[in-house]
Amino acid sequence: MSELMHVGVDLGGTTTKMALIDESGKMIDKWAIATNTIDNGSHIASDIGASIVRKLGQLQIDRSEISGIGMGAPGFIDMATGFVYKAVNIGWENYPLKDELEKLTGMPAIIENDANLAALGEMWLGAGQGARNIVCITLGTGVGGGIICDGEILHGVSGMAGEIGHITVLPKNGAPCNCGKSGCLETVSSATGIRRLALEALDYNDSDSILRDIFEDKGDISAEDVFDCAEKKDPLSLVVAEKAAYYLGYTLGAISMVVNPEKIIIGGGVSHAGNTLLLPLTKYFKKFSLPRAFESCTIDVARLGNDAGVIGGAWLAKTKIGRIRTV
Amino acid sequence: MSELMHVGVDLGGTTTKMALIDESGKMIDKWAIATNTIDNGSHIASDIGASIVRKLGQLQIDRSEISGIGMGAPGFIDMATGFVYKAVNIGWENYPLKDELEKLTGMPAIIENDANLAALGEMWLGAGQGARNIVCITLGTGVGGGIICDGEILHGVSGMAGEIGHITVLPKNGAPCNCGKSGCLETVSSATGIRRLALEALDYNDSDSILRDIFEDKGDISAEDVFDCAEKKDPLSLVVAEKAAYYLGYTLGAISMVVNPEKIIIGGGVSHAGNTLLLPLTKYFKKFSLPRAFESCTIDVARLGNDAGVIGGAWLAKTKIGRIRTV
């Protein structure tokens, strides 16, 4: 009996990460290549295909030992066909990614949205191990989401399930969001949103603050600065951190009444704030959820960092393509 | 080849509805018995079992022609064991409903929450036909919910998925809810909530209103009165109807970012308001959803009325227990 290995690919706007992972989740090798977005991204698939084929050659691994390729891409994806409708950062529009990748490598491929892929990675080998009902939230430049129910990613009818960054938390007088609406969660709980809240607070308030010192020193502040200062009990930073946690906790409360997860996993840069974020977040999550839903759920920080995507890709290849073969 | 028939049971606090339905969804017979809640509901299962056995006898149908029994009960249910943790109106606590029913009838049984059962019924033969991603909302005394993703009911880790009546829509100064929190959707968009909003509006406002005439005449008003008067363009009633629709639309917008349904089905007494509710509701749903999610979703009124539960029960029996047999 021989076990298959699985290829995970995580396509980003500047770098494409790849990994070869075995049936048990052991990372055999991981590597990255630059994402070449010129000519509307028309070189990307062949670059990735060539890199995978080269790597297997180097490692003297035969294609027959590989289940297939699980790949994440930013943008809207049709899971059934592996078609990428639109991936703005990459330049693709209506791009047949699955077909291209299969043609180039001779291996079956499966395509998924990158945020969903990360959620699957955390479920397999990260903070979600053992849970089958998971909400993953990535707090970075924006707010991304991936929702797993009964072990499967929720896509919804048009691939919009899990777009929790665009749940409205400020129905009136909210800040404009990149999506065209205003008052979305993303406008207050992303790194960008937290920076904006902090700049507003500095403007509105004249009190002494070590956050203000940083602002006057650097000419700018980041969400990281806010949480660093909040950890040092800077009152103004504590107010901003509490506000970001309030809106996120409010949203998690609502989400828990919809999908009732066992585990909520917070990833992205803002998650490095640790308890400075998690403690107020848990307080507000409790406030806006029913006891039975709150008590059956834990909030945790993502564990896999940048590897979540390729691990999720390998998981997809393992569970959706590959099966243990008997030789 | 012979097709199986399916028994659906919908347990309510005063009446238990039952039906025998064939493979194609045709109602062969439906009947009801009183729900006997004395002695902590200890007679209920045997009443139901006896009624089913008697009915099959009358119709000269052999047990071997039945796939099994799909039954809905109010309260928290463990799907795996068919155990009812708590059903307040019925008197059950930790009641092994599935085991009892199977012992009494000699047929396999499957138990589901009653709101979820109604959602499955609407998916099979009602407003949700053809859709596999559905959110059902029942606007009655409370606000109930049943969510179907990829054709399966969402339960979550502790059976709380779909409890959308307890999503907070008024985080500040909301009215108290039966659940112990305040500002839940149920406090503003249920029949009870709409009545309360209308009484507040009458109190706050001195303007002439045909709703006020009804109030002064009857000494009370109902949600139905509000929508009747709104349909006649009574300004005060229009404001109240718009408010109820606003909060429901706000919640549906958030839900659409979580599960991205193809169909939202509104049931319960308040759904009889038709377009007086649906038009403002659709407006606010659009406002609080992303275009791609809004455009792939339609809002519809439930079609099966009180039969939704027994039809959903038969669907469960058909899909989870029964298969077409070859004789």
Image: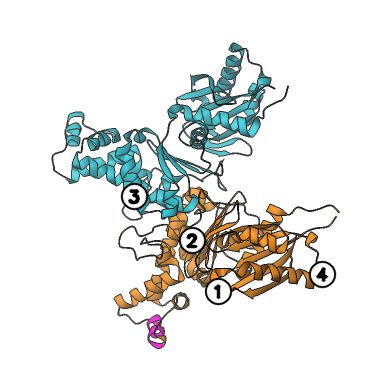
Chain colours: A orange, B cyan
Dot placed on the residue nearer the N-terminal end, 4 or 2: 4
Q: Which residue is mark 4?
A: A60
Q: Secondary structure at mark 1?
A: helix
The label nearer to you, 4 versus 3, is 4
Residue A208 to residue B180: above or below: below
- How far is the residue under mark 3 from the one under mark 2? 30 Å
Residue B267 visible in rendering: yes
Residue B270: image location, x then y, percent: 34, 35
Dot 1 amino acid type: Ile
Q: Which mark is residue B284?
A: 3
Label 2 resides on the chain identified as: A
Identify the residue at horizontal 16%, vertical 33% (top origin): B213
Give, as a single range, the part of the protein colored magenta.
A208-217
Near-viewer residue (A167 or B180): A167
Q: Which residue is mark 1?
A: A38
Dot 3 amino acid type: Tyr
- Magenta region, mostly helix, strand or loop? helix
Residue B3 to residue A102: above or below: above
- How far is the residue under mark 4 from the one under mark 3? 59 Å
Q: Is A304 placed left or right of A197 in the picture?
A: right
Q: Which residue is mark 2?
A: A282
Residue B124: image location, x then y, percent: 53, 33
